[in-house]
Image (spheres, helix red, strand yellow):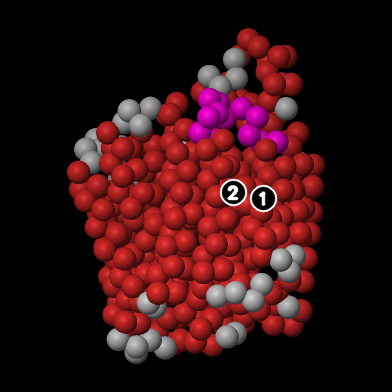
Amino acid sequence: MRHRNFRLFFGGQSISLIGTWMTRLATSWLVYRLTGSALLLGIVGFVGQIPSFILAPLAGVLVDRVDRRKVLLWTQILAMLQSLALAWLTLSHRITIGEILVLSALQGIVNAFDMPSRQSFMVKMVGDRADLSNAIAINSSMANAARLIGPSLAGLLIAATNEGWCFLVDGVSYIAVIVSLFLMRIEADDEPLPATSMLVQLREGWTYVSGFAPIRTILLLFALLSLMGWPFMVLMPVFAGQVLHGGAHTLGFLSGAVGVGSLASALSMVLRRSVRGLTKMIPFAAVIFGIGLIAFGFSHSFWLSMPLMLITGFGMMQGLTASNTIVQTLVEEKMRGRVMSYYTMAFVGMAPFGSLLAGAMAHLLGAPHTVILSGVACILGALWFWSQLATIRRQMRPIYEQLGIVPRADLAISEPAER
C-alpha cells in the first residue's frame, strides 16, 4: 500500500467490484426468474465467457504491445456502457433472454481484454517486484470483500425492487476505477515495440507456456477446475429456489458465504511474506474445494449449506491466489501479457464450457448430483497435480535462486523448506 498507484487502484476497484458482483447475481436471478431453466442459466454463462476462451491469446499479444493502462480505460468504459444498457432495458421492463445473451457476450469480449491487462498491469502499479505477491493477495482480498458485499446487497435490492437497480449501481460504480486510472502516474516503457508480427508473438507465447512445466501444470489444473468446479455458481439460483426453497435473498446469502470463505483465504495469503511453499498449497486447496462441493451437493438445509459455502469459497480462492502468485513470479516480463492471457483462458475461458456442461448435467441429473460429480473431478485433478510436484519444483528452483527467493548457497536446506 506504500505505492501511490496501487492505492488508487485499490480505492477505485473496491467500489467497482461491488457493482460487478451485484450484476453477476442479478443477471443469474433475472434469467432464472424469466425462464426457470437451469439449462438457460448454463447457456447465458457460456455466452458470457466463451469470448475469453477465443480472444484471450490475441488479447495477450495486444497487451504486450500497447499501453496497458489505455487498454484498461477502454475496457472499463465499455463495461460501464454495457451495465447501463442492461439497467435501462430491465427498468423499462423490455428485457428479454435474447438481449441478456447479447449483452452478456459483449461483456465477455470486454473481459477477454480486461483480465490479461489487469493482471499484467499489477507489476507496473507496485514497481518493486518483491511486493508483487503481496499486491496479488491484497487484490484477491479486495475482490472477495466485494464478493461478500455485492451479492448480499443485490439480494436485498432485488427483493425490494428489481434487478435493474443492481445493473444501474454497477454502471455508476465504474466511474471510480476510471478516475483512479486517470490519476495514476505510470512511467513509460523504454522497450521499443516488438519487430515481430502478432502471429509470431502468439506462437512464442504458446511455446513458452506449453514448454515450461510449472506454468503448464498450474494452468491445466485450473482449466479442469474451471470446467468442472467453478460453474457451481451458475447453479446457485437452482439451489436457492428448488433445493433450499428460498428466494433472491437466499441466493444472496449463499453467494455471500462463498465470499466470506474466499476473503478469509485471501487475507491469510496477505500475511505470507514469501512465495515459497505455495506449490503444495495448490493441490490441498483443490481438495478442500472438491470436498466442499460434494458436501454441498448432499445438503438440503440452508444452515448446513452456508458453512459448506464458506469451505468451498476458501478452497477455491486459496488455490487461485497461490497459482496467480506463482505464475506472476515465474514469468518473464516480456511474456507477461501473453502468459496472463493463457491464465485467463484457464480461469475464465474454460468456464463457459463448464457452465454449459453444468446446465446440461443439472437438466438431466439435477443440480445436487451435478455438483457432487464436480467435486469428485476437482479431487482427482488435485491428485494428478501432486504427482507432478517434483518436476515443477526442479524447474522453478533456478528462477527462485535468480530472484533471491531461494538462497543459492543453501539449496540443501531450501529444498525441504519448499516442500
Q: Is residue 166 left or right of residue 214?
A: left
- Seen from the viewer's position, the closer of residues 354 and 19 is 19
Amino acid bearing label 2: Gly
Which of 166 and 223 lies nearest the eye of the viewer? 166
Q: x, y percentage for residue 62?
A: 36, 55
The residues bearing labels 2 and 1 have C-alpha atoms spaced at a distance of 6 Å
Q: Nearer the viewer, residue 179 or 390?
A: 179
Task: Identify the residue shown where x is 79% and y is 47%.
Answer: 383
Image quarter where the C terminus lies is top right
Q: Which residue matches tag 2?
A: 261
Residue 273, magenta (yes or no): yes
User: Which quarter of the image is occupied by the N terminus?
Assistant: top left
Q: Is residue 403 magenta?
A: no
Residue numbers of the magenta segment: 269-280
Say if mark 2 contacts mark 1, CB within 8 Å.
yes
- Number of other residues with Cα within 10 Å of mark 1, as a class: few under 14, some 14 to 19, many 20 or more: many
Q: Is residue 91 visible?
A: yes
Element carrying mark 2? helix
Name the side, left or right, on which 106 lies relative to 366.
left
Crowd band around label 2 with a 10 angstrom C-alpha radius: few (<14), some (14–19), many (20+):
many
Q: Residue 116: image x %, image y %?
A: 43, 52
**Residue beneath label 1, please?**
311
Q: Classify residue 55 by image quadrant.
A: bottom left
Q: Where on the picture, by quarter, is residue 395?
A: top right
